[in-house]
Every structure is written in C-alpha cells, then in structure tokens.
Amino acid sequence: MTTLELQKMANEVRKGIVTAVHSAKAGHPGGSLSAADVFTYLYFEEMNIDPKDPKNPDRDRFVLSKGHTAPGYYSAMAHRGYFPVEDLVTLRHLGSHLQGHPCMQHVPGIDMSSGSLGQGISAAVGMALAGKMDKKDYRVYTLLGDGEIQEGQVWEASMFAGHRKLDNLVVIVDNNGLQIDGNIADVCSPYPIDKKFEAFNFHVINVADGNDMDQLRAAFKEARETKGMPTAIIMKTVKGKGVSYMENQASWHGTAPNDEQYAVAMADLEKVGEALCQK
C-alpha cells in the first residue's frame, strides 16, 4: 500500500477503536490509538499473512504483549478481513468472541492469548526460536508498552533472544510516555530504553515519530535487513493519537468515552479522513 493508503486505513482503524470501546463502555483507547499506525503497517504492509488461511504454518506471527490494547489489534484485524468490522461493537459483551484481551481460542489469526504484562515477548521469543529450529523463514513481531517493560520478564526474554541471535524477531516498544498511573519516567523510569536493548545484543532502531508511516516503513525495512541479532524498534508515539481530548492524557489509558465524547472523537477522526482525501 502507498503511504497515503496506509494513513487512511490507520484512520479507519482508529474509528474502530473508538467505536468498540464506546460500545463496550470499557477498554483501553489511549494505547490502542498510539499503536494504530503500527498495527496498520504490520497487517496491511509488513507481515506475510492471509486472513483466509490464518493457521498457515509459514505465516508471520504477531504477539500483542500489551494485550490490553486489544481494541486496536481487533480493529486492524477486522479491517484486514479476519472477521467482520461490524463485530467491533460487541467488544467485551457477554458471548462475544472479542474479549477484553486477545484470546487465540476465539479469534482466527490471533497467534497468542495475552494480557498479563511481560509474558507476550517471552511467547514471541519462543516462536522465533521454533522458527530457527524448524528452519522456517517466518518472522515474529511483538508489541510492548513502555510501561510494560518495567516487568523483569521482558529482560529475561530479551537476554535469551540476543544470546540465541534470533534475527527473525522484531520487538516493538510503543513509547507513548504514559501508563495507567501517569508518566512512565515518574512511575518507574525504563529509560534509556535503547541502551538496555543494546546491552542485550539487539539491533536498535529509534523511530522519532511512530505515528508516521514513512518512518515505520524505513524501520521495518532496516529490521528485515538485520542479520545475526534480533531487532528492537523503539517508537515515540502520542497516547490517544487522533482524538483531541485524549492525546497525551494518562486518564484515557483505560477509560471509555461517553456518548458526547464519542461524537467528538468520531468528528475529530472524520476531519483527519477528509484532510487525507484532499492529498
């Protein structure tokens, strides 16, 4: 897809996020919106996947380690064709296949159930190791929150991945700077993130604007070309990106918009879409 097509799709993904969380009256919009661009890039450009054959053993794998941002994940998957976009309004409803955190038993295309912070990267590392042992060409991607990397298990997994030279693994950190209790630097600073991954023998790519498709394209190209070590992409993003009153507000980490707020959010995203259509 062209950059403009990806931008338009990411905006549709954001509409899906806001719609799903509003319908559920619960969920995590802030970190879903900050990661909407990388979800879109992965599912529409980067990964070797086929919604019609979600269990293909040669497919690329994705693990959402920050599983609470399932609304963003689901929205990207729905728009990619794994299930109807109309299902997004059933998020967290009794009997829905779209639970509050990703569940591989209920949604085709989800490679790992996740949500307990720190565990997703370990599963992704295991998948990457399996790929090497089976001499397969598939790649494994995992998305972590910057608050999530305060978990010690993240660094155990990273140590192993670096030691085993898993160059089929890409760890992405959504560095939006905010977690449920506020600024990550105040809660328990993980900085410098890049130096930590370098210390565990990762090739590190710092992305100045992780909400910019061209910068994401360059980063994933560099990751593909990196041999002999895993890659960590540290991307600076805006929490709540695209919705005026949610941007850079920790209070929207896990809060659903009411009817009035939903209308404002959708109007914000409609304006973004109109601007993109004029390009």
Image: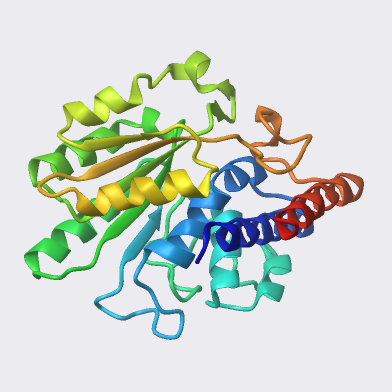
Residue 143 in the image: above or below residue 2: above
Count of marks, rendered view: 0
**Residue drawn at x 25%, y 31% as measured from the top left:** 197
* Colour logic: rainbow
Most foreground residue, 221 or 136: 221
Residue 115 in the image: above or below residue 175: below
Quadrant placement of the C terminus:
bottom right
Most foreground residue, 21 or 18: 18
**Residue drawn at x 52%, y 63% as measured from the top left:** 2
Residue 14 in the image: above or below residue 59: above
State left or right for residue 94 relative to residue 79: right
Task: Give percent across and percent down for residue 25.
Answer: 77, 52
Most foreground residue, 276 or 262: 276
Q: Quadrant of residue 133?
A: bottom left
In this rendering, does residue 159 appear at all?
yes
State left or right for residue 164 relative to residue 58: left
Task: Give percent across and percent down for residue 273.
Answer: 74, 56
**Residue drawn at x 38%, y 22% as measured from the top left:** 190
- Furthest-front residue in this view: 279
Task: Give percent across and percent down for residue 98.
Answer: 60, 67
Task: Give percent across and percent down for residue 174.
Answer: 46, 39
Q: Quadrant of residue 72?
A: bottom right
**Residue drawn at x 71%, y 55% as measured from the top left:** 276
In this rendering, does residue 120 appear at all?
no
Q: Quadrant of residue 99?
A: bottom right
